Image: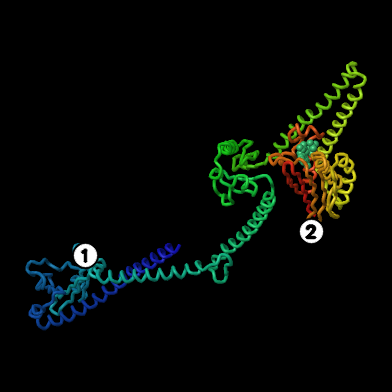
Amino acid sequence: MKKQIFRSILIAATSVFLASLVLIMGVLYDYFSSVQMKGLETETYIAASAVEKNGKEYLESIKTGDYRITWIANDGTVLFDNKANETEMENHLEREEITEALKTGKGKSTRYSDTLMSRQLYCAQKLSDGSLLRLSSTHLSPWALILNMLQPIIIIIGIAIALAVFLAYRLSQRIIKPLNQLDLEAPNMEEAYEELSPLLNRIAAQKKQLKTQKKELKRKKEEFDAATENMNEGIILLGENGNVLSINRAASRILNISSYSIGKDLLIFNNTFEIQELLRVAQNGEHAEKTITVNNKNYQFNASPIISDKKVSGVALIIFDITEKEKAETARREFTANVSHELKTPLQNISGCAELITNGMVKPEDIKDFSAKILAESKRLITLIEDIIKLSHLDENQKPCDFEKTDLYELAKLTHRNLIAVAESQNIDFLLLGESAVINGIPMLLSEIMYNLCENAIKYNRKGGYVKMQITNGTDNAVLSVSDNGIGIPPEEQERIFERFYRIDKSRSDKVSGTGLGLSIVKHAAIIHGAEIEVISKIDKGTEFRITFKK
Ligand code: ADP
């Protein structure tokens, strides 16, 4: 813009200067022509007077190169000429100025010479004897005049152009200055050019509109971020070229991508074949799904094309963690198989005994033993089914309304009362220690925990051993500890004892009855209470189960 203004001013200034020059030259040329003609007339008059007095002698004495002096007789014969040989000169009677002077006493005329690029001014005066004196001078044409004055004209044009450049520069600077100083954030209408006010008003209106739109977009983005940020599912929005537009925390964690990934190609961070393939299908406008293992976890990747104007403008990638789901499915499958297996053994025993009795293959004196076996197996079956029912109840998550203020020590007293006879029958010392500790819990499940732990401590003990149940009341938590000095649990088994139907070394467990579900129930009940379980055990020294409840 600055350049354009500068150029325009320069062209205008130079054109004005040249036009003025031509105009002045034209006007002055005519003025000087008339002045010169007047001068020639005066000089012709003076010369004519001198010739009247002194005749040819005077003419011969004059030494002037500027004028041509011709003396002509009244018949047109040239008597004298200071620039040519008068004898060779033709008759001058026909010349315009001579004809006029013969008639009126004075005559003048102008003739143009193309070759000399000049005009000849002629002035004639009639003398008293009838002869005529003619003076002639050269008057240059405008072009010749310009050529003669070329040097000063070039100097003047040079100065004028320099001046025009300087002025144009200053002027363009001054015009541009208010534009450069314009604060588009808060334009001062009074300082700005009046012509700019419609533009400034429009800019202000658009700025306002942009601000509102920006605010709206920001609000929507914040809403979207807030909704997706805390989701467990990973969400990645990709642009047309696979560049990351948005990525939530879960997706960053799963794919181990930093937040600096925005704007970059997703494949820079993860270019596994599966993801490449997923994106390729989605970018071709089709939905694609794949289960991909990342860091030993199974994720389901769903890639859907984002279509706008019938064109794929991006891809939405949603990642679900299906590790737990798959684990749960495997556990359920195993559980069903285990349940069938565990139920089958006692049922087979019962049916075997019953068949023998029915076929009369059992001696009458043995019928009592067979009946006792049927009773024991039936009891085992009932316990097993009861435990399965308990577990399936625990699987259906407990509602918060089932929780109530519960004193662990009061519940421990009940458990102690229920199991003291069993302990005594096996010559085991069963102690209850501690103090009252109130927590928010489900009494039935807490009793289940205590019962299973104490029953195990009695079962997996030795004659003359002890079982100690203790309740400790802390400021932030309450601890239930059940310890014994029984057979202990091998370190490598301590993790697995909480699995459903898991029993350590069938040979040692078979001596004592059990379903392998007791500690699963304990673990589940503890999880529902947000409690932590700790197992401290040494083979042949004893075991301690510590359950810490948060208050
Ligand atoms: P079970 O019905 O067999 O007792 P549990 O789930 O209660 O099933 O226990 C799993 C296994 O853990 C038991 O089979 C037993 O071998 C072991 N166990 C549990 N408690 C103790 C303990 N106090 N001392 C030694 N071993 C134990």
Tell me the quadrant of the picture where the N terminus can be found.
Answer: bottom left
Rendered location of residue 410, percent (x, y)? 88, 51
* Residue 14: image tag: none
Q: Amino acid at mark 1?
A: Met
Q: Residue 64 sits in which quadrant?
A: bottom left
Q: Residue 376 sits in which quadrant?
A: top right
Q: Residues within 10 Å of mark 2 (few under 14, many from 20)?
A: few
Q: Residues within 10 Å of mark 1 (few under 14, many from 20)?
A: some
Compared to residue 466, the image places residue 87 above or below, namely below
Rendered location of residue 326, percent (x, y)? 70, 36
Rendered location of residue 468, percent (x, y)? 82, 48
- Label 1 beta carbon less than 8 Å to ligand 1: no
Which residue has dot 1 on it?
Answer: 117
Q: Amino acid at mark 2?
A: Thr
Work out whether residue 300 or residue 195 is closer to the camera in this orientation and state it: 300
Q: Callout 2: helix, strand or loop?
A: loop
Which residue has dot 2 on it?
Answer: 475
Kindly tell me whether residue 287 is visible in this rendering.
Answer: no
Q: Seen from this angle, which residue lies furthest front?
A: 464
Rendered location of residue 381, percent (x, y)? 85, 30
Work out whether residue 515 or residue 456 is closer to the camera in this orientation and state it: 456
